[in-house]
C-alpha cells in the first residue's frame, strides 16, 4: 500500500522539474528526494520482505492508505520539482538531514526489535486457539489471547512507554 509513494514522488518531481527548471534540480531538492525515496523504499519494499508475518488489513484501510500514498507524494514532488524552493541555509539543511538520519536509524532499530518479537511469538505454542475469549497468561511479558501471542517490546525507546496496551 506504500509502494505508490516513491513512484509518484519521483514521477511528479521529474515532470515538474522539466517544466519549471528546464535543467537539473537544486542539490537540496535532489537530497530531499533521495531521503524520501530511501525512507519509502524501506517501508514499501524492504520492510515487507523482512517481516515474516503480518496481520490482515481491512480493505478500507488499504484503500485509504493507497489514496494517501498517492496524493501526498504528488504534493511533495510538485513542491520539490520546482513549485517550491528550499530556502534554508546549508547548516540548517545539514542539521535537518542529520535529524532525518537519526530518525531513520531509530526506525530501523525499533523495527528490528519488533521483528524479533514476531520471531519469538512464532515459537510460542498458541494455546486455546479455538476458545473465544480465552486468556492464557504465560509470563509477565507474554500473553496469549484467543490463540494470538502478545509480547511487550523491550529496548530502545520502548523502555519509555509507560502503559503498554498488553497489560
Image (cartoon, rainbow, N blue to C red):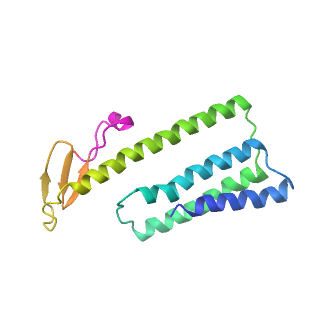
Q: Position of residue 63 (x, y in %)?
A: 49, 68
In the image shown, does 153 or 89 lie closer to the viewer? 153
Which residue is found at the position 19% from the left and 50% from the top? Answer: 143
Q: Quadrant of the C terminus?
A: top left
Q: In the picture shown, does residue 41 fall above or below 56?
A: above
Q: Residue furthest bottom?
A: 59
Give the quarter of the image for residue 49.
bottom left
- Seen in the image, is 141 located left or right of residue 9? left
In the image shown, does 117 or 59 lie closer to the viewer? 117
Total labels: the figure holds 0
- Seen in the image, is 82 located left or right of residue 124? right
Which region of the structure is painted magenta?
152-166
Question: Does residue 153 belong to the magenta stretch?
Answer: yes
Q: Position of residue 59 (x, y in %)?
A: 43, 71
Q: Position of residue 44 (x, y in %)?
A: 52, 58
- Seen in the image, is 20 located left or right of residue 144? right
Q: In the picture shown, does residue 26 fall above or below 123?
A: above
Question: Does residue 85 belong to the magenta stretch?
Answer: no
Q: Main secondary structure of the magenta part?
A: loop
Which residue is found at the position 67% from the left and 49% from the top? Answer: 33
Q: Residue furthest right?
A: 22
Which residue is found at the position 84% from the left and 59% from the top? Answer: 19
Q: Position of residue 65 (x, y in %)?
A: 50, 62
Q: In the picture shown, does residue 117 fall above or below 90?
A: below
Amino acid at each position: 500500500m506504500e509502494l505508490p509513494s516513491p513512484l509518484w514522488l519521483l514521477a511528479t518531481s521529474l515532470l515538474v522539474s522539466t517544466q519549471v527548471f528546464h535543467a537539473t534540480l537544486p542539490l537540496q531538492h535532489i537530497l530531499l528526494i533521495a531521503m524520501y525515496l530511501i525512507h519509502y523504499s524501506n517501508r514499501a519494499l524492504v520492510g515487507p520482505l523482512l517481516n515474516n508475518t503480518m496481520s490482515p488489513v481491512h480493505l478500507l484501510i488499504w484503500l485509504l492508505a493507497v489514496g494517501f500514498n498517492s496524493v501526498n507524494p504528488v504534493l511533495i514532488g510538485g513542491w520539490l520539482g520546482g513549485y517550491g524552493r528550499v530556502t534554508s541555509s546549508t547548516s540548517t539543511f545539514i542539521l535537518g538531514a542529520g535529524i532525518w538520519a537519526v530518525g531513520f536509524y531509530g526506525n530501523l532499530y525499533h523495527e528490528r526489535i519488533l521483528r524479533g518479537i514476531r520471531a519469538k511469538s512464532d515459537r510460542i505454542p498458541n494455546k486455546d486457539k479455538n476458545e473465544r475469549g480465552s486468556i492464557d497468561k504465560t509470563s509477565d511479558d507474554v500473553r496469549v489471547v484467543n490463540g494470538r501471542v502478545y509480547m511487550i517490546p523491550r529496548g530502545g525507546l520502548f523502555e519509555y512507554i509507560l502503559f503498554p496496551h498488553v497489560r
